[in-house]
Amino acid sequence: MFESKALTELGDLVSRVQQITTYLILRSLRVAQDGWRLGVMKRVGTANRGNNGTQLEDFVVGVLDAAAECDEILDTRVLKVVLGAVLEDLGSEEAEHWAGFARKLERTGATFINSIPI
C-alpha cells in the first residue's frame, strides 16, 4: 500500500517532531500560567485564533488548526505528539474540559480528533 521509503521518512519526521516538541514544550511549560490550556480551547472554538497568546498557546493553536484544516495523517501524527506532551499532566477538572472539547470536535467528522489523548 505505502512504499517503505515513504513510511521510513514519515517515521523520521515524527521522531524529529517528538524531539523538538519535547524540548520546546517542556521549556515553555516551566513558565506557563495555570489554565493556559483552557485558553487554547477557547481560541480554537472561535474565529479569534490569531497570535494573541503566549508562544506556547500560539504554537498549540497552530498545530490544532493545521490538523483540522488538512485532516491528513502527517498533521494528525504531529498533533498527537504535541498534545501528548501538552496534556500529560492534566488535572481531572481540566481533563473533563478537554474530553468535552474532543466530543464537540468529533461531531464535525474530523479524523484528527482521535489524536487528543484523553
Image (cartoon, grey):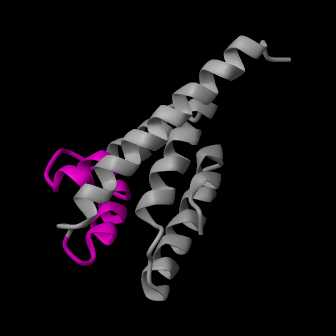
The vertical placement of 4 against 81, above or below, is above
Residue stretch rendered in magenta on the structure: 33-60
Q: Position of residue 54 (x, y in %)?
A: 16, 55
Above or below 23: residue 89: below
Quadrant of image for the C terminus = bottom right
Q: Nearer the viewer, residue 6 or 65?
A: 6
Along the horizontal axis of the image, is 100 left or right of 63?
right
Q: Going by the picture, which residue comes out furthest to the bottom?
A: 93
Question: Which residue is at a point 44% across and 75% down the rendered structure image?
Answer: 89
User: Which residue appears at 32% of the width and 54% of the height?
Assistant: 25
Rendered image quadrant of residue 30: bottom left
Which of these two is toward me, 20 or 93? Answer: 20
Pick the residue in front: 97 or 24: 24
From what the image shows, is residue 9 above or below residue 21? above
Asked if residue 48 shows in the view, the reply is no
Residue 45, given in percent of the width and then of the height, sits at 38, 58
**Is 70 above or below relative to 63?**
above
Residue at the spot x=51%, y=81% of the render?
96
